[in-house]
């Protein structure tokens, strides 16, 4: 029962991340005169993490991201037996969030799907960046994100500030990388939007699983080494 509560919390948290973060991009970023722009979208993603960190952090740890779950496992902070279940809950929560967003967005007259906040490279990168640039960006940004998470949640770190540090970290990551890939660092978030966009987004989705997980694994290994008590 306790484990099921964790999975439900991860479902709700990832649902909120997609609805809040991607929703800000789809519904508000391009609104005439009142559009929040990519700075507002960056802040929205950060706010989803901050709010859920304090809402469900004590229940599930508030991963909201398969890369985070894998990175925490590699860093010795998470049980291997729970990894697959967490990832499934996150992906289902993200897809549900995208479905709700689609229902809302399609209620507008003359609705056009557009990019639906999907992640991409090449001609589907907001700035036209190459696949190599996208790969490097996603690996490095996810490494940084996991490094922040592992540090902010370390037993010796101020525990009441972890959610704020992690949320601001995600905001900064979006400010840097939205022009390159529309920012993933989260395979569940990428999958949810790619399913509705289809076509090119599904074809490029592999990068937004491989790169974030690679960055997370590296961060877990590096931080585990740095925080080890041994010389």
Image: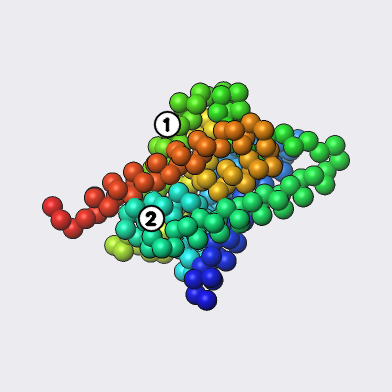
Circle nearer the N terminus (1, 2) = 2
Q: Is residue 100 left or right of residue 1?
A: right
Residue 62 percent across, percent down from the top left: 49, 60
Q: Is residue 51 visible?
A: no
Q: Residue furthest left?
A: 231
Please name the residue shown 61% across and 37% down the image: 202
Under tag 2, what secondary structure?
A: helix
**Of residues 147 and 103, the one drawn nearer to the viewer in this rendering:** 103
Q: Which residue is mark 1?
A: 136
Residue 127 to residue 79: above or below: above
Label 1–label 2 contact, CB within 8 A: no
Residue 124 percent across, percent down from the top left: 61, 28
Please name the residue shown 80% across and 44% down the image: 106
What number is the disc on residue 72? 2
Circle 1 Cα neighbour tier, 10 Å, few/some/many (<14 / 14–19 / ≥20): some
Q: Residue furthest bottom?
A: 1
């Amino acid at each position: 029962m306790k484990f099921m509560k964790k999975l439900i919390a991860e479902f709700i948290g990832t649902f909120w991340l997609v609805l809040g973060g991607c929703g800000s991009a789809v519904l508000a970023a391009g609104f005439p005169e009142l559009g929040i722009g990519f700075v507002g979208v960056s802040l929205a993603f950060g706010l989803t993490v901050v709010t859920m960190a304090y809402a469900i952090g004590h229940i599930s740890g508030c991963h909201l991201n398969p890369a985070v779950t894998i990175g925490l496992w590699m860093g010795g902070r998470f049980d291997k037996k729970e990894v697959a279940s967490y990832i499934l809950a996150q992906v289902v929560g993200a897809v549900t969030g995208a479905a709700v967003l689609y229902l809302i967005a399609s209620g507008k007259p003359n609705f056009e799907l557009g990019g639906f906040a999907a992640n991409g490279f090449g001609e589907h990168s907001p700035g036209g960046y190459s696949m190599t640039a996208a790969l490097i960006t996603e690996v490095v940004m996810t490494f940084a994100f996991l490094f922040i998470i592992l540090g902010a949640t370390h037993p010796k770190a101020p525990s009441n500030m972890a959610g704020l540090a992690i949320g601001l970290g995600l905001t900064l990551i979006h400010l840097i990388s939205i022009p390159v890939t529309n920012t993933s660092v989260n395979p569940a978030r990428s999958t949810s939007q790619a399913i509705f966009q289809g076509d090119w987004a599904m074809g490029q989705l592999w990068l937004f699983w491989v790169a974030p997980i690679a960055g997370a694994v590296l961060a877990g290994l590096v931080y585990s080494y740095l925080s080890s008590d041994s010389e």
